Amino acid sequence: MSMETTAACRIEWYRTPIEKEQFKALTQRSDAKAFLQAGSYLLVIVLTGALTFWVKRNLGWPWLVPALFIHGTVYAFLINAVHELSHGTVFRTKWLNSLFLHIFAFLGLNNHVFFRASHMQHHQHTLYFPQDSEVVLPIKLTLKGFFQTALVNWPRMKWQMGQLLRFAFSRFKGDWECVLMQDDKVRIAVVRWARAMLVGHVVIAVFSLAYGVWLVPVLVTLAPFYGEGLNYLLNNTQHVGLCGDVADFRLCCRTIQVNPLFRFLYWNMNWHTEHHMYAAVPCYNLGKLHRAIGHDLPPAPKGLVETWRQISSILHSQKADPSYQFVSTLPEPG
């Protein structure tokens, strides 16, 4: 597969019609709304980190594990922050968008340059393999995988740290990485950011250990790898079990309804069909977009319990027949 091959696959996606003026209003970016989302999320990370320090000092070891779990639960959604800011739709002011993108990418050990290159292909060719090799069907999920993710995710830590080191030394492997790195500017930017993260986190570790505050790297560098259970339950609803090679986001993406706290942590990505259908709409306007076009979308499962009942049924069917895909019920044309 080459970048030329990937670019040559142009898909005429179905999108629910929406009035021009209404769409224009929905795509308006707001620094105030962006600060409310990004600033509040960063504050929550700081507060859970501070809480963990307080627990260690005042309550001792038995309470440290649940405190770390809470911090890891919040920290896991850094990937969603990077995702939204990579779209460039969160802040009206570009340098603010870039500033928060770099902060969240550094904290979460995410190479936002590589992610953006990959994610652009994912949006243009959602679940069309190999043009979209970011999300490849069938997605296999297990109870063992969930518990491993929810506690300490050693496999992902090994993989992500390995990727960080490879990128820092300009080493890429696999068709997907090699295709995305054909652009010299992108490759150089990926390498530079990987090196910046590597140096930054090494400095954090060295100074923390030198001053006897070993908890700092645990709360920063290692935090992406524990307490990811809630993120697992939310992020894995997006495409699992749905249809590939179909030019209709209503059939290859899943919208779910969740409570306001989960929507905040998840950066409103529960409105996932809407996000794919109109990616220019900022995350804080996706609820309004859903109300505008919801009449043309499949019914959205209410809450994680109903959502995972549906997904579990799909995974059970796929275990018996690996080619099975769930076809969402679409509204009758009005």
Image (cartoon, grey):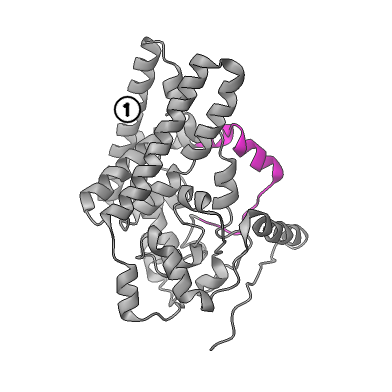
**Which quadrant is the N terminus positioned in?**
bottom left
Number of labels in the image equals 1
Question: Is residue 258 inside the magenta stretch?
Answer: no
- Depth order, front residue of 167/49: 49
Q: Amino acid at mark 1?
A: Gly
In the image, is 255 to the left or to the right of 131?
right
- Depth order, front residue of 72/312: 72
Q: Name which residue lies at 45% across and 78% down.
A: 16
**Element type where label 1 sits in the image:** helix
Q: Name which residue lies at 58% across and 16% down.
A: 61
In the image, is 144 to the left or to the right of 249?
right
* Magenta stretch in the rendered image: 135-159
Residue 1 visible here: no
Query: Label 1 belongs to which residue?
Result: 200
In which quarter of the view is residue 231 placed?
top right
Instruction: State whether residue 79 is above or below residue 278.
Output: above
